[in-house]
Amino acid sequence: MMSTAIELQALTKRFGITKALSDVSFSIRQGSVHALVGENGAGKSSLIKILSGVHQPDGGAVRLFGQDFAPKDSAAAQLSGVSTMFQESQQVSNLSVAENIYLGMEPRIGPFLDWSRLMKQAGDLLGRLGIEIEPGRPMATLSPSEAKLIEMGRAVSRNAKVLIMDEPTANLNQAEQQILFRVLKQLNEKEGVTVIYISHHMQEVFDLCDHVTVLRDGQHVATLDVADTETDGLVRLMIGRQMEAYFPTIAAPAQGEPRLVVSDLAHPARGLDGASFEVARGEIFGIYGLADSGRTALTNALFGIQTGFAGAVRLDGAPFAPTSPTAAIEAGVILVPEDRKLQGLMLDLDLLHNFSVGNLGRFVSNGLFEKKTALEAANTHIQRLRVKPNNAYALVKGLSGGNQQKVAIGKWLNRDFRLAIFQEPTRGIDVSAKMEVYEVIKSLSEAGVAILVLSSEVLELMGLCHRVGVLSGGRMTATIERADFSEHAIVSAALPRRRA
Amino acid sequence: MHEVDVPPAATKSAGSLRRVVSAHTEEFLLAGVIVALIAVGGFLSPVFLSQYNITSVARQVSFDVMPALGQLLAVLAAGIDLSIGAVIRLAQMVSILLVERVPLPVAFLLVMACGAAVGLVNGLLVVKGRLEPFIVTLGTWTILDGLSLLVTGGRGIAANVPDAFAYLGRGTVVGIPVPTLIAALVVIIMSVVIHRSSFGRQLFSVGSNDLAAHYAGIKVARVRVTVFMLASSLAALTGFIMAARTGAFQPTTISSGGAGTELATIAAVVVGGARLSGGRGTVIGALLGATLTGVLFSILVLAGIDPYVQSLILGLIILGALLLSASRRSKS
Ligand SMILES: Nc1ncnc2c1ncn2[C@@H]1O[C@H](COP(=O)(O)OP(=O)(O)OP(=O)(O)O)[C@@H](O)[C@H]1O
Ligand SMILES: [Mg+2]
């Protein structure tokens, strides 16, 4: 007989005029891995923030193992056995890995930190989870994916009975995802931990979870047994309509002179070792590469973030070596960066500001900023990209991840450009937002823009691109035509080369 | 799948009304506090509401408002300018030294050039030297005050100010002090620069997220340097007009409580709702903040409160305003 771990009763949460959750009721069985899916802004994070004590509901109640459960903060939630890996990282970067894991519950001798026991505990924990990271390393030196794994360690260290994971794989490569899945299975099967798993990847829902709850616009749509569903049905429930083809149909690009020619671009210290490739007008060129393949250096060179690269780049035939993002933008190159919060958005400012900032010049006459024109443009983008909320004065920090990504892209739609670089364009965004982003990329391509898509999702590159180049060890080890696409061909070309 | 759509017109008017009210509650609050303070002042002493006193408070507040707007610029760009008071004092000294020797416009331009030059140095040190604005401007503060002491030998200097110059500091137009008119002009210009110009947009972008601003093609370094130059220029303008009013310069103000000025500007912008970490603040807020602190001080003086107690109160105001803004942040 299965008992209930968590029962939600008519849970309601408002943010100002936005109703993030309205009357949501469903239960989660003890020992299950329960998926929570829905579009960006559906209310998934809001729901789990109530369970983890970050937010308090405006109505309704939660029962945890049959007891009333209304944690007033996250410490209280953890004491009751509910640990959460949040969508946004929660780390103290100037502390060590071990301190971050045990933050707030470090072993002590009297008033003093018991450093050696802390290190040992953290080392044991990481060892048990199979995470190979030194507990003494400063958090600031970790890659985003390593940091995610540490966050998992932290959640585990609290002896959770319920573990909540909000889009945990969003920043991880495949190997790291495997570690995460393994740890998840271990916790669930061996230790009986109940898991709530939020993801936009349907594959993960089917591979990992036994139940799934669909939210839409803050409402509970359905809670199903995963065995009784399939992807299309689930997606239909999420978006409330029939989904058309997932990827847009890509027309063949116009032939002619290539827009972008990169020859022997190199900077050994930054991991680029003579990369060469060409992108035609209107071509969508995917770039696949593992973490140290040189993909970041390539973007930095093309967008003027770093300088001093050897080799040559030509844009429409003219030499192109931008010394700053400003110079790159003026030459007609735009970048939708990997980390939208850090590099792409002004979170404390409103949509109007964020949309206009990609081309302030367009809204200026006589040195004055023409708010009315900027507002019109912002509203156009809000409609076109279906940004929620539909309000140019909303602050970007209140938007869900997918909607933030739309803003990060939308800010460039106020200007004309020749080359667009998309770094992980659909990270953390839902199916319909993905489709909308793909549509934007497609329409840019039809307008003759040369497009570089750097993604760690092979299927995305295969669905979207005309050609895919594979970076490995700082070189293009393969360039694959659409007709020859296969997951195997792309992934195997990306494996590190053995040096002769 | 979208939220129920309200007709666009309705959303617009209801939204903008709500926006105006919610965006300006703090300003209404500040204005209320100022009115209450004035009432208290009148209650404490009938002199407070006399024509003479009102004029002199208005003049004094003008000298607080102009540098506060300079501080606002620095704070909006996620910086701080501690050298503002020292630039005011330097400008006062230079004005007194020059005004008898060169024509007034030349003196004015030279004083403004001094201010702009200090700002340029501050800006370049922050941008090229990658130093914290706090450290850099603390350094210039000390250096400039040292310079003023050195040049004057620590003794007061005075000049026979020409009438035109004196008019800038002491004159009135239909009863309104000329410094107040100048400050009003500065407020108007600065609110256009900050809230209506393209530069203002860049300023908020840099203050809110400088990396994202850089990636959006904004010339972050240039914005920062411009901010420091504008802030110092406003300070120089203030010093010039203060010299016109007093006709003298007392370097002793440096050792005794002269440090009040930079803190008063910070108090003004923080009370006015600006956020020290950048990206949030308004001209009207800084104006009200400076007026509030200015009026409060004139009441303290009138009530015969010890000047040392005054700086104590200033510190309490800054802490109080910071606590208030911190609690507001945790609520939102
Ligand atoms: N702190 C906040 N302030 C204002 N509005 C908020 C806040 N947090 C969430 N919202 C709003 O509540 C709604 C639900 O957001 P939530 O973050 O729960 O979505 P989500 O399902 O997690 O989306 P995503 O898949 O993009 O992460 C959205 O409309 C969002 O804009
Ligand atoms: Mg979320």
Image: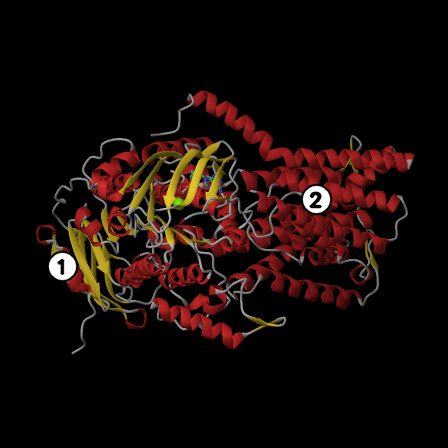
Q: In the rendered view of the protein, which quadrant contains the C terminus of chain B?
A: top right
**Could you tell me if the residues under marks 2 and 1 are in contact, i.e. CB atoms within 8 Å?**
no
Distance between the Cα atoms at labels 2 and 1?
68 Å
Q: Which mark is residue B65?
A: 2
Q: Position of residue A302 (x, y in %)?
A: 29, 58
| Residue placed most toward the observer, A159 or A356 | A159
Quadrant hosting residue A129 = bottom left
Q: Residues within 10 Å of mark 1 (few under 14, many from 20)?
A: few
Q: Amino acid at mark 1?
A: His
SS under mark 1: helix
- Is label 1 within 8 A of ligand 1 (CB to nearest ligand atom)? no
Q: Chain of mark 2?
A: B
| Residue placed most toward the observer, A197 or B287 | A197
Mark 1 = which residue? A488
Write the residue at 15% across / 56% down.
A487
| Residue placed most toward the observer, A105 or A411 | A105
